[in-house]
Amino acid sequence: MMQTQATQNVVESPQVATLLASKSLQLSCAFALGIAVLFAAVFVQTSSVHNAAHDMRHSQGFPCH
Amino acid sequence: MICVILKDFPATNSIGSPVIFRRLVVIALVGGLIGGAAVSLIQWWQVTPIIVQAEKLESLKAETIQAVSQEHSEGSHSHGDGWRPQDGLERTAYMALSNILTAFGFTLVLAVSMAGAALKFKKNSEVNVAVGAMWGLGGFVTFFAAPSVGVAPELPGVTSVALELRQWWWAGAVICSGAGLYLAYVLKTRWKWGLLVGLLSAPHIYGAPQAQNPYQGFPSEVAVQLSKMSKDFFLVTGLSSLTLWLVLGIFSALAVKRYIDLEN
């Protein structure tokens, strides 16, 4: 109970609130997520990932083999 | 559809809530579905038949190589030993799924770049359909046209240099071209045009890894056929990529304008 209260206090503290609301940080996180997804779809060569994404990689012009 | 998904979000960016991040992810999900569905349809219609035909011809290469020599294995077409989707519906479904995933990533990068330009470089008034189409063209040049000049879209079975070399060059070309176009759009200095030309040409001056004979191991008449198919393949992959990027560019501009608070 006390721990929950403490966590809530941290989340609602002005510093954390400002950080979460920072537009630059949110844009950076969204950009990083996009790059991570693209990396998995385009570059990962694990056999099953490669085979699943094979036709898409050829069709989009990504290096595949 | 996007209105329904976003209606539960607060209308304003309340303090302490990562509203912009969540909205960008939702925009990318919807963009991924729309763009992924559109490009999958074109690929299923125009691109996949060429891939399937190339895979049939690839078996001739395997036989020739087995009969003549085992030495030219670098860059040969291997699907690995693990699971792979069955031909037919399953294979098409995985192509569509990976297209949706890729379009999700593209939309996220595109929407963030648009919002970043609006917020940090005062391009707020320029988020509209026409400029969205221009962003789409920028994405097409960055992720398809510029890298394709060095590493053209390859048919299955066509020999090339080591994959890692091509992937590194491809990623370098994408980063240089994207950075050049973005900086040319947001900067106000005159020397930005020099920067654009420099960044666009740098990967090509460095030089893309090229195979000496991409049709090595094929009988000559099959090599001629594959050479012609490669040109058709370049054209149809280019058209499908252009369609995808125009859809994503216009959609992202409309969605960013409507759902992202672009005022500082």
Image: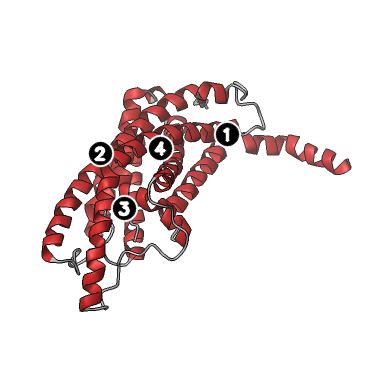
Identify the residue under disc 4. Answer: B36
Residue B153 pos. (x, y %): 26, 52
Q: Residues within 10 Å of mark 3 (few under 14, many from 20)?
A: many
Tags 2 and 3 on a common chain: yes
**Looking at the image, is mark 3 or mark 1 earlier in the sequence?**
1
Report the chain holding disc 1: B
Q: Which mark is residue B239?
A: 2
Q: CA distance from mark 4 to mark 3?
A: 24 Å
- Label 1 – label 2 distance at C-alpha: 32 Å
Marks 3 and 1, Cα distance to the nearest angstrom? 30 Å
Vertical relation: B25 (above or below) B179: above
Q: Judging from the image, what secondary structure is the residue with disc 4 in?
A: helix
Q: Earlier in the sequence, mark 4 or mark 3?
A: 4
Kind of residue at badge 2: Leu
Regarding residue B123, the answer to whether it shows in the image is no
Specify the amino acid type for callout 1: Arg
Q: Tell me what residue is drawn at x 48 percent, y 44 percent.
A: A34
Identified at 12% across, 58% down, the residue is B224
Task: First in sequence, mark 1 or 4: give its number.
Answer: 1
Who's the residue at 43% across and 47% down the image? B90
Which amino acid does the dot numbered 4 rest on? Gly
According to the picture, the residue beneath numbered tag 3 turns out to be B173
- Between circles 4 and 3, the one closer to the viewer is 4
Residue picked out by circle 1: B22
Pointer 4 chain: B
Q: Nearer the viewer, residue B67 or B73?
A: B67
